[in-house]
Image (cartoon, rainbow, N blue to C red):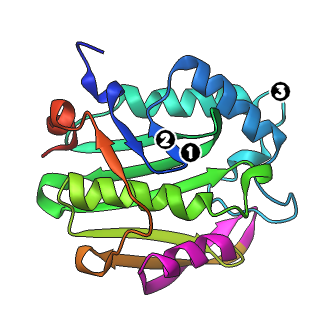
């Protein structure tokens, strides 16, 4: 895109492409959400967004994604990458920061459609985002969090070198739940897959760099 090259940014691994969404991508992402993201008996998200009725969920999801793009600034950004595997949108990997030029720290979050879980995609897509953060943007640290019971998310963090960084108590579906925090330093990150970054130079200023 000539006037906003951020939308041309791509991060690729041997199996995946991470890119910011087109409108068609968001339509397909909503399909993955409707197909299911987690066991209905367990809520892995603070916002409980997957509890929305099926006739409301797609609109809420798409509005949230578009709001992240509309509100983007170098001082506060939330990069919701579409995760593409074998030509299909299978989930989303976000990378976010506030005052990145000063803090040099990013946060992340993600989800995958249930039929695409258990194949190592979650680890590969977060590794790609971390490579962008550390090798591409010059971040010094990355943080993540997971609720008690989110074993897959915690396993990805441990696998990629994060260390425990405390916990706090939150309310989820009206219940008291522990939220576990993790932190990864740049020098502790060893990317488990080859990653290539395309189009970053043209949009580096959008990240506060």
User: Is 84 displayed left or right of 101 in the figure?
Assistant: right
Q: Residue at x 49, y 51 (%)?
A: 14
Which segment did they paint magenta?
Answer: 151-175
Give yes or no for residue 84 being in the magenta stretch. Answer: no
Q: Residue at x 61, y 57 (%)?
A: 121
Q: Is residue 54 above or below residue 183?
A: above
Q: Is residue 99 visible?
A: no
Asked whether 132 or 209 is in front, the reply is 132
User: Is 95 displayed left or right of 152 in the figure?
Assistant: left
- Of labels 2 and 1, earlier in sequence is 2
Q: Which residue is mark 2?
A: 17
Q: Position of residue 189 (x, y in %)?
A: 33, 75
Task: Assign a secondary structure to mark 1.
Answer: strand
Real-space Cα distance between discs 2 and 3?
29 Å
- Of labels 3 and 1, earlier in sequence is 3
Residue 19 placement: quadrant = top left
Tell me if mark 2 has few (under 14), some (14-19) or many (20+) residues whose alpha carbon lies within 10 angstroms of its own: many
Task: Assign a secondary structure to mark 2.
Answer: strand
Tell me if mark 1 has few (under 14), some (14-19) or many (20+) residues whose alpha carbon lies within 10 angstroms of its own: many
Real-space Cα distance between discs 2 and 1?
11 Å
Asked whether 150 or 179 is in front, the reply is 150
Q: Is residue 111 above or below residue 26?
A: below
Give the mark toward the camera: 3 or 1.
1
Residue at the top extreme?
Answer: 2
Q: Quadrant of the N terminus?
A: top left
Tell me if mark 3 has few (under 14), some (14-19) or many (20+) residues whose alpha carbon lies within 10 angstroms of its own: few
Q: Which residue is mark 3?
A: 55
Q: Position of residue 138 (x, y in %)?
A: 17, 59
Q: Is residue 61 visible?
A: yes
């Amino acid at each position: 895109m000539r006037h906003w090259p951020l939308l041309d940014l791509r991060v690729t691994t041997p199996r995946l492409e991470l890119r910011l969404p087109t409108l068609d991508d968001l339509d397909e992402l909503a399909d993955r959400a409707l197909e299911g993201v987690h066991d209905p008996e367990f809520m892995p998200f603070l916002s409980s967004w997957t509890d929305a009725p099926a006739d409301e969920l797609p609109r809420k999801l798409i509005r949230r994604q578009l709001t992240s793009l509309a509100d983007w600034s170098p001082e506060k950004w939330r990069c919701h990458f579409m995760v593409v595997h074998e030509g299909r949108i299978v989930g989303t990997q976000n990378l976010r920061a506030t005052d990145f030029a000063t803090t040099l720290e990013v946060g992340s979050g993600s989800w995958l459609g249930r039929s695409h879980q258990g194949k190592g995609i979650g680890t590969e897509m977060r590794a790609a985002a971390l490579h962008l953060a550390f090798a591409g943007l010059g971040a010094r640290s990355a943080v993540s969090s997971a609720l008690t019971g989110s074993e897959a998310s915690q396993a990805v963090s441990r696998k990629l070198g994060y260390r425990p960084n405390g916990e706090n108590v939150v309310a989820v579906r009206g219940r008291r739940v522990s939220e576990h925090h993790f932190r990864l330093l740049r020098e502790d990150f060893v990317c488990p897959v080859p990653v290539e970054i395309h189009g970053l130079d043209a949009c580096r200023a959008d990240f506060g760099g």
